[in-house]
């Protein structure tokens, strides 16, 4: 079957990465976690003291953008991928609440978005890719053949994220996670450059009342029907 680009956008903690990763594996496609790329830049800024009491030191960050290299590598003995920042595995570090609380501010910087969008477009040149993020179907690949938009209530998303963090041994409260989810929704939806919006031709999936398997089956079956029509 013809290989296509599948763009999965949506709000934070809707399970985009989990679904995208699983779908890519089922199709034999390449998976790219664009959120991890913005998290990696955020971690770089944190580790290089680029945050002040007033926010991110944009000038300092922009002067050092060319020093940031982000790659993805297969985890040894697994189908999972790991995020490499300047050659170092930062997969666990970029999932911390410290990074989560600051990533939307980094993602709102136009120069950062331009750099990463260029990288993302390069990754999709050969098609056969599943990419998830906030603006994949609207900015990165507006010509993607299949676009999905995932959403769920803030409370459900916060609950899922809270349980995930607890499972990783993180010390967080539900209230802290819910506040983070709400803040990220606001920043992502209201930023001037590439705000989070549903593409006109995207299929919306509200997974508030769905389990992971039900979500995947719906998306996988729809994708297979679409691919058969595209032959």
Image: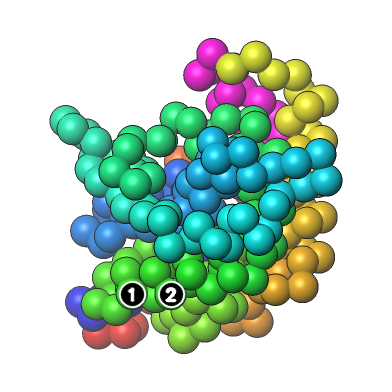
Which of the 4 image quadrants contains residue 119? bottom left
Judging depth in this view, the residue of 193 and 49 nearest the camera is 49
Q: How many marks?
A: 2
Question: Residue 223: where, in percent of width, then height?
Answer: 39, 67
Question: Residue 82: where, in percent of width, then height?
Answer: 33, 40
For disc 1, the neighbor class at 10 Å (few under 14, some 14 to 19, many from 20) is: few
Judging depth in this view, the residue of 136 and 148 nearest the camera is 136
Which residue is outermost to the left? 77
> Quarter of the image containing the C terminus?
bottom left
Q: Residue at x 18, y 32 (%)?
A: 76
Asked whether residue 227 is in view, the answer is no
Question: Which dot marks residue 118?
Answer: 2
For disc 2, the neighbor class at 10 Å (few under 14, some 14 to 19, many from 20) is: few
| Dominant secondary structure, magenta | helix
Q: Residue at x 44, y 30 (%)?
A: 92
The vertical placement of 174 against 54, above or below, is above
Q: Residue at x 58, y 62 (%)?
A: 62
> Quarter of the image containing the N terminus?
bottom left
Query: What residue did someone put label 1 on?
Result: 122
Which of the 4 image quadrants contains residue 27? bottom left
Asked whether residue 58 is in view, the answer is yes
Question: Residue 125: where, in percent of width, then height?
Answer: 29, 79
């Amino acid at each position: 079957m013809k290989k296509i680009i599948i763009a999965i956008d949506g709000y934070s903690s809707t399970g985009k990465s989990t679904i995208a990763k699983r779908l890519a594996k089922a199709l034999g496609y390449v998976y790219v976690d664009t959120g991890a790329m913005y998290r990696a830049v955020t971690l770089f800024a944190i580790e290089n003291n680029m945050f002040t009491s007033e926010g991110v030191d944009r000038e300092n960050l922009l002067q050092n953008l060319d020093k940031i290299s982000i790659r993805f590598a297969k985890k040894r003995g697994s189908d999972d991928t790991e995020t490499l920042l300047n050659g170092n595995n930062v997969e666990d570090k970029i999932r911390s609440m410290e990074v989560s609380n600051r990533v939307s501010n980094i993602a709102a910087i136009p120069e950062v978005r331009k750099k990463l969008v260029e990288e993302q477009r390069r990754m999709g040149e050969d098609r056969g890719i599943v990419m998830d993020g906030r603006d994949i179907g609207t900015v990165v690949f507006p010509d993607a053949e299949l676009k999905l938009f995932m959403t769920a209530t803030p409370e459900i998303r916060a609950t899922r994220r809270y349980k995930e963090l607890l499972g990783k041994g993180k010390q967080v409260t539900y209230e802290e996670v819910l506040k983070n989810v709400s803040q990220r929704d606001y920043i992502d939806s209201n930023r001037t450059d590439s705000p989070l919006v549903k593409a006109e031709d995207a299929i919306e999936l509200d997974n508030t009342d769905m389990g992971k398997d039900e979500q995947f089956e719906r998306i996988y079956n729809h994708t297979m029907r679409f691919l058969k029509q595209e032959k």
